[in-house]
Image (cartoon, rainbow, N blue to C red):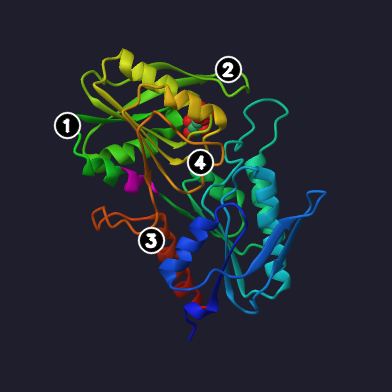
Amino acid sequence: MQSFSDIAIFSGNAHKELASSVCKHLEMSLGESEVFQFSNEEVFVRILDNIRGKDVFLIQPIVSPVNTRLMELLIMIDAAKRASAGRITAVVPYYAYGRSDKKDQPRVPISGRLVANFLEVAGADRVLTLDLHAGQIQGFFNIPVDELTAFPMLADYFRGINLEKPIVVATDVGGAKRARDVAERLGCDLAIIDKRRTGNNEQAEAMSLIGEVEDHDCIIVDDEILTGGTVASAVDLMRARGARSVYVACVHPVFSKKAFEILDNAAIDQLVFTDSLPLVFGNFHNVNTSKLSMAPLQAMPSTEFTLEDLLVHSFAKFHLLALQY
Ligand code: R5P
């Protein structure tokens, strides 16, 4: 009979804090490894523990420097495979390149698919991820993909602060389904923004709104924020339509340098995000933020789930599933 001692967890350099926190919850140590770059920027990995036959989890959100962190993950998978790991799960809380998920212009790649190919070719047996940009990305893989979601946790947060007249706002039509899920959890209405992007220069504009937000507490939800342009434009639209308060919530705080500047100066009552990835480009100084820590949330109701809870739950689930084979 297998036990947690058959699990081995390793982390690259993307989010060691998260990996350590997961291990703390599992009451086990993070596996020992060396992951660094030579002076010519080639990545080197050495797994220092014996993982022969073990159920190996490699935790690595693909965050800036994106291509280096991706290579770390791929090379860690290769190292684990060559060390005769029993099964390798790539735990990717943030899946970069997910926004390149279709050929929507002539002569463009589908980079999200390419990353899936890389992970498979490297030797991953399965992928555990969190709120992909589009659920269909699961289909880019020929190996099992378990996609967890942090939106219920975001919904619980807003239920906890007792807004008087909440309404959930999707930043674009693509995000309407997940926004509707949040609205249903809060028992409130949904509004949808018609967003336009012109060219590939990270400029987004909220054009019009389906729904009525006047005198409401707006909760703008998105899967990720990069430059902050999408939500800043959405916030302006909410204010122009007479919202009495505007909250912004996202799962993945990708936050480029520009986002800190834009969101610090936007008319936002509170910006809520998870720690699926670390803030690598800076910090906020003006805007009121709330980071939903995935670490044990003593201050929050017991119904709250943390990312670690989710991951731990999944680890346990995967492990139990493994026992059946
Ligand atoms: C796009 O479809 C996504 O859901 C986000 O709205 C987008 O990635 C945000 O990007 P930015 O913050 O650069 O506007």
Is 159 or 143 nearer to us in this picture?
A: 159
Foreground mark, 3 or 2, reads 3
Determine which residue is flagged by label 4: 134
Residue type marked 4: Ala
Q: Earlier in the sequence, mark 3 or mark 4?
A: 4
In the image, 83: left or right of 31?
right
Query: Residue at position x 26%, y 53% from top?
Result: 299
| Local secondary structure at mark 1 | loop
Q: Circle 2 sits on which residue? A: 198
Q: Amino acid at mark 2?
A: Thr
User: Position of 79 compared to 10: left or right?
Assistant: right
Circle 2: element type: loop
Mark sitting earlier along the chain (2/4): 4
- Label 3, on which residue? 309
Q: Mark 1 to mark 3: distance in Å?
A: 30 Å
Tell me the CA gap for discs 2 and 4.
Answer: 21 Å
- The residues tagged by marks 3 and 4 sit, at their Cα atoms, a distance apart of 23 Å
